[in-house]
């Protein structure tokens, strides 16, 4: 079983991924953020580092999907924090649309993505955490990563629009959308239970 948690920056993916992994006793796969050699530079100068960062994330995410595939064939459960689909359909697409990534870099990137994606299995469940801008901003501030302090509202807004478009067209498997605007699964265990019940219902038809 493979559940992938998707959503905008600060939506609460990592927090939920850890809690679900604990609950189901499954393995958790987090993003390569702390050791990412481009992320800080990217936030300082997006046009300069967009392509480098996308290639780095794509490779790191692809390796993760291959590792997940191995665990799946050994019947192990997996919770994944963000997917390779978001790199291409959300972040790279947004950089291109915002003219922060050039036409030729974007097409070069998409060629790489297309070659890789045929080897990637979709998750059994895609869990989208939908959050409005105030919630995202509040949680990004709460996390307080230096390099995210100057993220513009416009950037988050554009990403949210890409998420909505992508989710509305997602047809590769089961999809569960959870509005997290009024959920606090950090402090309220019952809010976590609401999500777990929805997962069980969507995946196993329980409840
Ligand atoms: N539903 C929630 N309610 C309140 N705080 C949350 C919630 N989800 C996440 N947080 C807090 O918001 C911050 C960002 O969450 P995080 O899981 O790192 O988001 P993401 O992985 O989506 O970027 C963390 O400090 C986390 O404790
Ligand atoms: N593909 C990506 N392009 C640009 N930025 C990305 C990409 N994937 C992740 N990120 C950024 C967004 C955040 O600053 C960090 C971690 O993501 P988070 O949503 O906070 O888990 O990396």
Image (cartoon, grey):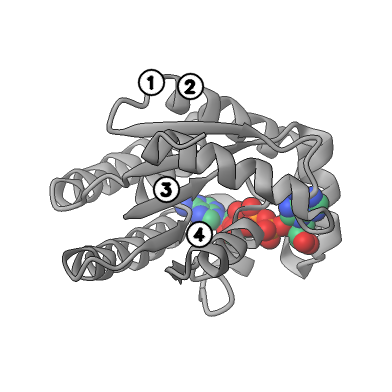
- Find residue 116 and report its horizontal and vertical position in percent: 18, 52
Q: What separation in Å lies between label 2 and label 3 (alpha carbons)?
A: 14 Å
User: Image quadrant of residue 146?
Assistant: bottom right
- Find residue 67 and report its horizontal and vertical position in percent: 26, 70
User: Image quadrant of residue 122?
Assistant: top left
Q: Nearer the viewer, mark 1 or mark 4?
A: 1
The crowd level at tag 3 (other Cα within 10 Å; few <14, some 14-19, many 20+) is some
Mark on residue 87? 3
Q: Does the Cβ of the disc 3 residue fall within 8 Å of ligand 2? A: yes
Mark on residue 165? 2
Residue 207 seen anywhere in this rendered image of the structure? yes
Nearest the eye: 25 or 115? 25
- Find residue 157 and report its horizontal and vertical position in percent: 69, 31
Q: Circle 3 — which element?
A: helix
- Asked if residue 78 lies left or right of residue 199, the reply is left
Q: Nearer the viewer, mark 3 or mark 1?
A: 1
The crowd level at tag 1 (other Cα within 10 Å; few <14, some 14-19, many 20+) is few
Q: What separation in Å lies between label 1 and label 4 (alpha carbons)?
A: 29 Å
- Asked if residue 60 lies left or right of residue 73, the reply is right
């Amino acid at each position: 079983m493979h559940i992938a948690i998707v959503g905008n920056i600060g939506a609460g993916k990592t927090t939920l991924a850890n809690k679900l992994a604990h609950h189901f006793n499954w393995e958790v796969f987090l993003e390569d953020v702390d050791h990412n050699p481009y992320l800080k530079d990217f936030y300082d100068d997006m046009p300069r580092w967009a392509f480098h960062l996308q290639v780095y994330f794509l490779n790191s995410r692809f390796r993760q999907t291959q590792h997940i595939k191995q665990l799946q064939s050994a019947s192990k459960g997996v919770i994944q924090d963000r997917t390779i689909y978001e790199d291409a359909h959300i972040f790279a697409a947004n950089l291109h649309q915002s003219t922060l990534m050039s036409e030729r870099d974007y097409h070069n990137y998409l060629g790489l993505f297309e070659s890789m994606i045929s080897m990637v299995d979709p998750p059994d469940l895609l869990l989208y955490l939908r959050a409005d801008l105030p919630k995202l901003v509040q949680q990004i501030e709460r996390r307080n990563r230096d390099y995210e302090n100057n993220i513009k509202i416009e950037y988050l807004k554009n990403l949210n629009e890409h998420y909505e478009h992508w989710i509305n067209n997602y047809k590769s498997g089961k999809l569960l959308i959870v509005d997290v605007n009024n959920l606090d699964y950090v402090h309220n265990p019952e809010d976590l239970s609401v999500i777990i019940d929805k997962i069980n219902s969507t995946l196993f038809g329980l409840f």
